[in-house]
Amino acid sequence: MFENEVVKNPRFNKVRRPRRIWQSGDQENTRRYVMTSRLFVPHKGPQSPAHPSDHPWLRRAVQNSGGKYSINPRKPAVYEWVDDSLVDLTQSDRPQFDPGDIIWMSFTVGFNVGNEEWWPDVIPIEFVRVGRLPEHLIDDIQGGTYPEPEVKPLIPGLVLQPITREPSY
């Protein structure tokens, strides 16, 4: 629906690049959909002060960028709905989302035209746990329980640097 309106706009995709196939919604691309929120944004104006919640690795990456980037101040918020009010998820009895949680989310949609294709960006704003499936249904999701994901932790001392993409004309 969003895409149909954007494509009709004569100011969008003037060079008529094709739509990126990945995440197009066609039958072969429906297994997974990705939303992203940029970790770093181009730095414009005065430098924002670091927040205590900003991880030292992120602050160091900003310093290493030579002032070109800042930590994105628009991080997605995570909440739980408790007794008719929002509670920060970190202050909840279960401070993380788990399989079986019912999540309400808000997001924005942006559209990009790259060097070869155009695509939508779905950018999350808020995630709110509003309920939980009954326990007897959680084990039956996708025919079984969710395995623990394989996680490789970040290594202390690792230097993160933003990836730049200069437009080519």
Image (cartoon, rainbow, N blue to C red):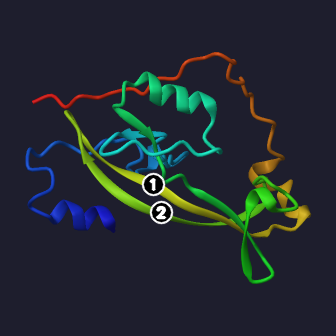
Is residue 24 found left or right of 169 in the rendered image? right
Going 10% across and 58% down the picture, which residue do you hit?
11
Going 33% across and 68% down the picture, which residue do you hit?
1
What residue is shown with label 1? Answer: 123
- Mark 1: amino acid: Ile
Looking at the picture, how far across and down is residue 70, in whole percent?
A: 42, 39
Going 29% across and 53% down the picture, which residue do you hit?
111
Looking at the picture, how far across and down is residue 33, in whole percent?
A: 51, 48
What residue is shown with label 2? Answer: 107
Q: Secondary structure at mark 1?
A: strand
Q: Quadrant of the C terminus?
A: top left
Q: Nearer the viewer, residue 131 or 145?
A: 131
- Badge 1 density bin: few <14, some 14–19, many ≥20, Cα 10 Å: some
- Mark 2: amino acid: Phe
Q: Residue 64's image quarter?
A: top left
Q: Nearer the viewer, residue 27 or 81?
A: 81
Q: CA distance from mark 1 to mark 2?
A: 5 Å
Q: Residue 101's image quarter?
A: bottom right
Whether 80 is drawn above or below 166: the answer is: below
